Image (spheres, rainbow, N blue to C red):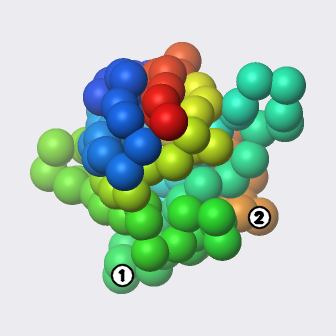
Amino acid sequence: QVHLVESGGGLVQAGGSLRLSCAASGRTFSRYAMGWFRRAPGKEREFVAGFSWGGGGTEYADSVKRRFTISRDNARNTVYLQMNGLKPEDTAVYYCAQDGLAYGTGNRRTRYDYWGQGTQVTVSS
């Protein structure tokens, strides 16, 4: 059974930084693409960033490019989202997700079948 646990959310002032972590268990982590999504109040869930199963392929939403960085540590079964230059519009619940199929590319069109419980990020102006 796949289990994803996010951590690292909190309250930060605009311009500040946070690093989210997502610890995964239940499958061979290195074989699966990982993604980060967010849901802001009153809005639909949106793709933020994705990381392929191997080779370092990444994809970002236009709204976070050059501010957010996704990375993964296969030895620790963990994916990270480094968020710099945070803006009030980044306020949302952030979720990590894992591809349902092995060896995927981890982009916005990936079918993510497993989800964490989410962590709140609040950016004050």
Q: Which mark is residue 74?
A: none
Q: Is 116 left or right of 8, judged from the image as shown?
A: right
Is the residue 106 above or below the residue 5 in the image? below
Q: Residue at x 44, y 75 (%)?
A: 66
Q: 9 or 21: nearer the eye?
A: 9
Residue 26 locus on image (x, y percent): 39, 29
Give amino acid for label 1: Gly
At mark 2, the secondary structure is loop
User: Hey, which residue is sitting farthest front in the picture?
Assistant: 125
Is the residue 65 above or below the residue 33 in the image? below
Residue 70 locus on image (x, y percent): 38, 60
What residue sits right under mark 1 in the picture? 55
Marks 1,2: beta carbons within 8 A: no
Q: Residue at x 71, y 31 (%)?
A: 40
Residue 42 locus on image (x, y percent): 85, 25
Can see residue 94? Answer: no
Image quarter of residue 91: top right
User: In 3D space, how far apart are the residues under numbered discs 1 and 2 (Cα atoms)?
Assistant: 18 Å
Q: Which mark is residue 109?
A: 2
Image quarter of residue 9: top left
* Other-residue count near label 2 (Cα within 10 Å), few / some / many at <14 / 14–19 / ≥20: few
